[in-house]
Amino acid sequence: MTRLTKRIAVGIVAAAACATTLTGCLGQPSGGADGKTSLVAVNNGEIQRITGAQNAGSQIAMAICEPLTGIADDGSIFMRGAASVESKDQTTWTVKVAKGHTFSDGTKIDAKTYVDTFDFVANGANAMPSNFAYEQIQGYDELNPAEGEPTGTALSGLKLVDDDTFTLTMKSPNNDVPYLLSMLSFCPMPESAFKDPVAYDKKPIGNGVYTLKSLDPQVEAVLTKDPEYKGWVPKGAADTLTFRVYTDTNTAYQDVVAGNADVLRSLPPGLIAQGRNALGKEGLTAIDRNTLQTYIAWPTYLDATYPVEVRQAFSMIVNRESISKDLFKGATLPATSLMPNSVSAYREGACGQYCTYDPDAAKALLAKAGFTGSIPLNYASSSTTDAATALAISNSAKEIGLDVEPKPVPAATLSDTINKYGLDGPSIQLWGSSFPRASEWIASIFVDANYRLKYDNPTAADQVKQALAAGDEKQADALWQKAEDGVLADQVLQPLYQQVMYIAHTKCVTPHAAGGDMQIYRTEVTCSQ
């Protein structure tokens, strides 16, 4: 099951005929007589909105927004809209805004622009979809009370210092702030946006590499480079970028194969084998850092029914190697850590013996626990990947006489059951991260609104706080790993596999990612007709 990523601590349009597309029929991005290039990208789903938290328009938002910071391919931070982001205590951060940057309409961007934007989005009364991202800033609770009306309109932890500088004070030390500020949730908005944010969302005024020229939510969005933009421009970025709407991935994939579209982000596992044959090495790129991971989640309110020995045994009858190699044909990698390989604290094999396929040891553990019952394995019925995973686990369990019953549940029903603490057994959950940091994977476990595990581990929770307060990355990573060890020992989350992101594309483009997250506007055009 895919859970909504609220983590802080991601009608079929017929393909146009070749003569009317912006791509060449030979599968090459088109180049005009003036030498300018254009790129057609697949947009997965109708573009109902663009700004705010992750949605079907997020890839468009990334192209028109320059955040304060950016994430490089290797996961490191670099400055974009900010000249610097610094802190001596990891609690109060000083942000100096880069000079000379403007919105695409020419409106000046300064420190007040960010302060006004942050106050507006953080104020619960404005019902902004990115509001949750501000939860760790001092003053958020006063603007978003559990009951009653907000007691103010501004974040107490946000202060304007001068035209180029503002400070941001967190509720507790947090060394992830430079990464937080790379999120779409912190994109600046001009003052005109506050009057009618719903209307603004339909035609946002960007401050990034591209400007939105036209938008038909059910057909396409067309973006062009802003000639006045003074910030970082990805190498080889197309002059014109068209996001064409598809609601069927198979149709989108076939258009890439035919050369009617240039890039499809995140090819589903079921199409990867076809992609290898049809596109070859020149047209199918695997991102080398992963940001999606699938787990088995065990709510602690079921501990009496499924004690730790049963959970350990369950994990040891899962043949992760076979699932990735034989079932998903390399579309996944066996997971042996609660974190994916895009995170600096990642350790292969962190899970140890309990992520190693060992039916005999599993059988002995079940005997020790005296367990003879069945285990319902819940998963979203709409997910063919989860269905295949559940069946593979069930078949493996039968080899030691354990009854694991695959239990498909409508996604909405399953989500509601999880949120109401009503599961009768473990569930399959897919999670992604907003940025490549350990907090997204370890700290998030202690936020009950995420997994609804009712999980408590005071020692590991304290190690999380220490990790977020650390001023040195090596020190922080060591603390994240200690906290991970504690969670793994409790067996409330069992890593299954990391999903490898494959990009289908025409041969004249090279995909690029931000710490493992492929971002379409960073696609490099390497040749033209």
Image (cartoon, grey):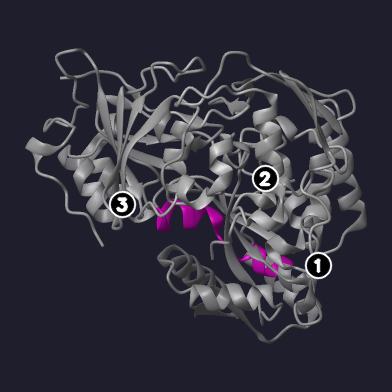
Which residue bears the numbered disc 3?
A: 271
Which element type, helix, strand or loop, lies under badge 1? loop
x, y percentage for residue 482?
Answer: 84, 44
User: Which image quadrant for residue 296?
Assistant: bottom right
The type of residue carrying mark 2 is Phe
x, y percentage for residue 153?
Answer: 77, 48
The type of residue carrying mark 3 is Leu
Q: Residue at x 74, y 83 (%)?
A: 371
Q: With 521 as the anchor, is 399 left or right in this view?
A: right
Looking at the rendered image, the quarter that the N terminus falls into is bottom right
Q: Earlier in the sequence, mark 1 or mark 2?
A: 2
Secondary structure that dominates the magenta span = helix
Q: With 527 as the anchor, is 443 left or right in this view?
A: right
Q: Which mark is residue 429?
A: none
Q: What's the CA distance linking mark 1 and mark 2?
A: 19 Å
Residue extending furthest toward the bottom: 373
Q: Is residue 67 visible?
A: yes
Q: Earlier in the sequence, mark 1 or mark 3?
A: 1
Which residue bears the numbered disc 2?
A: 120
Measured along the vertical axis of the image, is residue 327 above or below residue 74? Answer: below
Q: What's the CA distance linking mark 1 and mark 3?
A: 50 Å
Q: Which residue is at the front of the view, 340 or 253?
A: 253
| Extent of the magenta region | 312-328
Which element type, helix, strand or loop, lies under badge 3? helix
Is the residue marked by circle 3 packed among few (<14), some (14-19), or many (20+) residues within 10 Å?
A: some
Q: What's the CA distance linking mark 3 and mark 2?
A: 43 Å
Looking at the rendered image, the quarter that the C terminus falls into is top left
Which element type, helix, strand or loop, lies under badge 2? helix
Q: Which residue is at the front of the view, 110 or 366?
A: 110
Is the residue marked by circle 2 packed among few (<14), some (14-19), or many (20+) residues within 10 Å?
A: many
Which residue bears the numbered disc 1?
A: 148
